[in-house]
Amino acid sequence: MKQPFDPDIAFPRIEAAIAPFPKAGLSLLMDEGHTTAFEQLVACIISIRTLDEIMLPVARRLFEAAPTPHAISELSPETIETLIYGCGFHKGKAKQIHAIAQQVVNEYDGVLPCDLNVLLSLHGVGPKCAHLVLSIACGQEYIGVDTHVHRISNRWGYVVGKTPEKTLAALEAKLPRKHWNAINRLLVPFGKNICTPIGPKCPACPVLEMCQQVGVKERPSAK
Ligand code: SF4
């Protein structure tokens, strides 16, 4: 018999379960000193359709060469393309990062403000990266719905959302605000190591008793 999903109970258990695993890429960059909204936004853009294992060295290489909006705006898109080579869609991302750096220099005096409307007005920036930046770099209460948060919160049966946008709206309506900033930080390593896209380790999962396992066809044994 399943218990109702309770984030007050589940989140501390997940926090303990992910302790042995690496943090999410954006959090690791924060720990390394890449703490500005601009750096976190650029790293988030680089991370789209790109594994953290690739995003991290690419972001570090770019920030080492050009750590500020002003410095990046002075690079050509072709140079940025070379610096971020290795991530998915690097040509398009290089143009996007260059355009955003120019916009930040020209319109915000070189400092990207912690403001949702400003972030969403930037070239190609959507709710996922905007919310992650505001949550991680700015300490504001926002839910960052990436592929892990979308998949896992639907597997729990806590929300029903066919798209990340619908999952975001459902989480905003249901998840207590005190958990908004934590959910992405917790579910990225949880989704990479325990509630994996294929073969989730349900028998070893700390929230099995309250997870409806929606769409999890096989119940693999713990490994
Ligand atoms: S019980 Fe399985 S599907 Fe549910 S959160 Fe845990 S690993 Fe994921």
Image (spheres, helix red, strand yellow):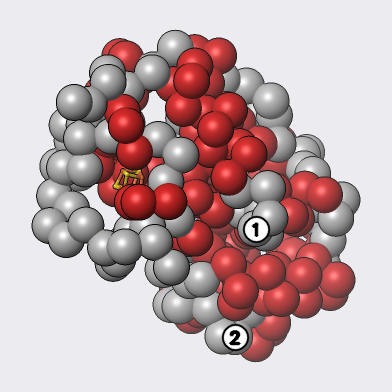
Q: Which residue is mark 1?
A: 21
- Residue at 71% of width from left, 76% of height from top? 57
148 over 94 or under it: above or below: above
Q: Which residue is mark 2?
A: 85
| Cβ at disc 2 under 8 Å from ligand 1 | no
Q: Residues within 10 Å of mark 1 (few under 14, many from 20)?
A: few
Residue sitting nearer the eye, 210 or 127: 210
Q: Indicate the quadrant containing the C terminus: top left, top right, bottom left or bottom right.
A: bottom left
Q: Residue at x 69, y 25 (%)?
A: 139
Residue type (three-letter) at the residue carrying disc 1: Phe
Quadrant, the N terminus: top left
The disc label shown at residue 129, or none: none
Residue 88 position by quadrant:
bottom left
Q: Position of residue 69 (x, y in %)?
A: 75, 54
Amino acid residing under circle 2 = Tyr
Instruction: Judge by depth and name the residue closer to the eye, 161 or 204.
Output: 204
Q: Is any atom of residue 58 visible in this view?
A: yes
Quick check: is the Cβ at mark 1 less than 8 Å away from ligand 1?
no
* Residue at 58% over, 67% down: 52
- Numbered disc 2: secondary structure: loop
**Pair 2/1: label in front:** 1
Res. 212 image quadrant = top left
Vertical order, 219 against 159 (above or below): below
Of 194 and 103, which appears nearest the observer? 194
Q: Where does the image place residue 129, in percent across and percent down from the top left?
A: 50, 45
- Left or right side of 43 for 89: left
Q: Pick whichever of labels 2 and 1 is earlier in the sequence.
A: 1
Residue count near mark 2 (Cα–Cα under 10 Å), binned few <14, some 14–19, many ≥20: some
Work out whether residue 116 can be spotted: no
